[in-house]
Amino acid sequence: MRILSGIQPSGRLHIGNYFGAMRQHVQLQADNEAFYFMASYHALSTVQDPALMRALTLGVATDYLALGLDPEKATLFKQQDVPEVTELTWILSCVTPVGLLERAVSYKDKVAQGLMANHGLFAYPVLQAADILIYLSNLVPVGQDQKQHIEITRDIAGKFNAQFGEILVIPDAHILDTSAVVPGVDGAKMSKSYGNEIGMFEEGTVLKKKVMSIVTDSAGVGDPKDPETSTPFLLLRLMASPEETAEWEGRYRAGGMGYGEVKKRLLELLDDTFGPFRERRRGLEADPGYVEDVLREGGKRARKVAHGVMEQVREAVGLPISYTPPD
């Protein structure tokens, strides 16, 4: 099966990105044909500093490689290295009803968060559909909260195929483990937008300060506590063994335990889990040329697929190119 997913280089990635998606992306590369890209065109709706965009794009690629993505098994590339995707976006725009975009929940949410209501933000689902459809993707790994985007992509592909012929593959959503929704230090869903994240590669004093700042309720040491509403516990169980998780759950409900104990153990688990990734990332940072080479080769492979699909799309809509494009 061909797997396709992208991640926006709109900020430093955090443990919510890892447990919510990236860990499973790495796992999926073993038994599937995986395409993973840095969604830089999408990030352009909010990041408009060129130097920052370049740095964040390279940073996300470095993160993926540090986490275990194997460029021999998965195609890792920059979205802008396949310019055909923007051409397909326009063609799909011409069959996409405005009402379909107006119903997109993520657009309303981002505007409510204070982001500028620009056309890029509004038309985000069409570009996302082009990202998916141009590689004839079968499965798109998403969280439950992103399922609507895949439904929109399916609608757009269906409208195109009904008008111009069965060219585009109708993709399915591959719903990622919903138990991996990760709370931030304030208890809300971890997000760069909220500023409540714990970075994957943070360590030392910076990491300790973040962990110790996690918001808890006012229950005393002797009071029983509800683990299901406790952010330190919800984070701890992402990394602890089932046996240790059950032990902590029992201690919560019995009372006689302070939140400081949980946070101390959480800090140890973060170091155990992400320590090897941090070390690998330091090695990659020392050789940025290698990361660029991986992206360059990935871009070539991805563009080869996209080129073939676009030839079919252009022919179908009556816009064949009249000359052979340069290599």
Image (cartoon, rainbow, N blue to C red):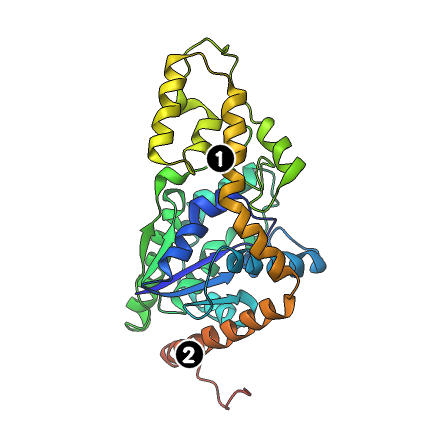
Residue drawn at 40 percent across, 18 percent down: 252
What's the residue type where badge 1 is placed? Lys
Height in image: 173 above or below 77? above
Q: Nearer the viewer, residue 237 or 297?
A: 237
Q: Secondary structure at mark 2?
A: helix
In this picture, residue 151 sits left or right of residue 257: left
The residue pinned by badge 1 equals: 189
- The image shows residue 108, relative to residue 324, as above or below, that is above
The C terminus lies in quadrant: bottom right
Q: Residue 305 placed where, x, y %?
A: 41, 76
Q: Is residue 87 above or below residue 224?
A: below
Q: Which class describes the residues within 10 Å of circle 2: few (<14), some (14-19), or many (20+)?
A: some
Q: Position of residue 233 (x, y in %)?
A: 44, 27
Q: Are marks 1 and 2 in contact (CB under 8 Å)?
A: no
Residue at horizontal 44 percent and vertical 84 percent from the top: 320
Q: Which mark is residue 316?
A: none
Q: Looking at the image, is mark 1 or mark 2 nearer the viewer?
A: 1
Give the residue at mark 2: 314
Q: Earlier in the sequence, mark 1 or mark 2?
A: 1
Is residue 203 visible in the rendered image? The answer is yes
**At which x and y percent is residue 36?**
46, 62
The quarter of the displayed image where residue 264 is located: top right
Q: Amino acid at mark 2?
A: Arg
Labels in figure, total: 2
- Element assignment for label 1: loop
Q: CA distance from mark 1 to mark 2?
A: 42 Å
